[in-house]
Image: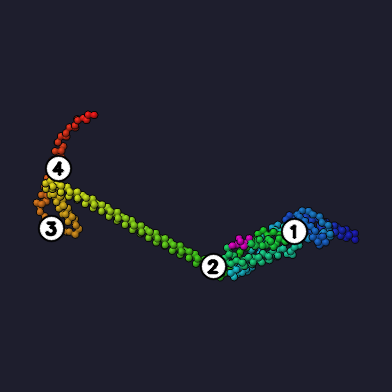
Amino acid sequence: MGAILAAVIIVVVVVVLIKLVRIVPQGWEWTVETFGKYTATLEPGLHFLIPIYQAVGRKINMMEQVLAIPSQDVITKDNAVVKVDGVVFYQVLDAAKAAYEVANLELATTNLIMTNIRTVLGSLDLDESLSKRDEINARLLKVADEATHPWGIKITRVELKDIQPPRDLVDSMARQMKAEREKRANILEAEGFRQAAILKAEGEKQSVILAAEGEKEAAFRQAEARERLAAAEAKATEVVSVAIEHGDINALNYFVAGKYVEALKAMADSPNQKMLLLPVEATGIIGSLAGIAEIAKESFSKQAEQRNTPRPPPSNTQVSS
């Protein structure tokens, strides 16, 4: 009997010691209840409680946690049905509120995020839902953080993992994208042909302008050459006329012979003439050549006389002042 009593006393002492000494691990906080009422929060470390009078209420994880948001169907603004899932990162800042302000913290947070996902995506069309994911995450974070503040937690991040449109809608979007790309390709190709046509037209225009300028320059040069030839002809005619006035018939023979030879040369160079038969008088050409020789002889004689004629001495007359 005494042994049994001793064993009971030992068991009670052990239970009392277990209830008395409490060690809270790092990253956790425990709430203390006195006769079922919250009175304090135990931080990491060694603590002593009065058995029966005090007890541990809730053990709260104070580290940042990840909560998976299950997939759900969401109707967008343009009546497209998409499947959306995500993740939520949160951290408990107030253990007492997380323990006593909400019955099931994870369930409440999950349902809150799912509801706000439907609200945010319902205000956007499909294209915006697929392209503005950062904006959607920011809006969800703001709304969820404000809503969970009374629960003593902090929503640090909300991320949509996947947004899946229906298969037929995906195929339709792929065809639309392909058509859009083909449209841009056709536009670029047409623009290339247009630029090529413009450049070709510009080149032809410049070619015509340069050809016209070349023809203009050639006509100007030809007119200038004809003008010079006419001036030379006039000068030659004038020289012959002066010689005739002084009684020099040989000059006229030289002039006529030159014209005669030029006429024969022009008829001989004609591409349409294969044979040339003319009643040419040899004595006329010989006479003209003789006239040319006489002119040259007279010219040489005049030059010799001018060289042999002595120049008069310079005058030594001085003007008296």
Question: Where is mark 2, residue-wise?
Answer: 173
Looking at the image, is mark 2 or mark 4 earlier in the sequence?
Answer: 2
Labelled pair 3, 1 in contact (Cβ < 8 Å): no
Q: Residue at image x 64%, y 62%?
A: 139
Question: Where is mark 1, residue-wise?
Answer: 95
Where is the N terminus found, in terms of image quarters? bottom right
Would you say 87 lies left or right of 310 here?
A: right
Q: Disc 3 versus disc 1: distance between alpha carbons?
A: 135 Å
Instruction: Residue 243 in the image: state x and y as whole percent.
Output: 14, 46
Would you say 49 lies left or right of 124 here?
A: right
Looking at the image, is mark 4 or mark 1 earlier in the sequence?
Answer: 1
Label 4 environment density (alpha carbons within 10 Å; few <14, some 14–19, many ≥20): few
Q: Secondary structure at mark 2?
A: helix
Question: Where is mark 3, residue-wise?
Answer: 277
Magenta part of the protein: which range? 132-138
Main SS, magenta region, reads helix
Labelled pair 2, 3 in contact (Cβ < 8 Å): no
Marks 2 and 4: which is nearer the front? 4
Label 2 environment density (alpha carbons within 10 Å; few <14, some 14–19, many ≥20): some
Q: Residue at image x 66%, y 65%?
A: 116
Marks 4 and 3: which is nearer the front? 4
Instruction: Residue 177 in the image: state x and y as whole percent.
Output: 52, 66
Q: As shown in the figure, which amino acid type bears the numbered disc 2?
A: Met
Q: As shown in the figure, which amino acid type bears the numbered disc 1?
A: Ala
Q: Residue at image x 17%, y 59%?
A: 273
Looking at the image, is mark 2 or mark 1 earlier in the sequence?
Answer: 1
Q: Residue at image x 27%, y 52%?
A: 221
Looking at the image, is mark 4 or mark 3 earlier in the sequence?
Answer: 3
Q: Secondary structure at mark 1?
A: helix
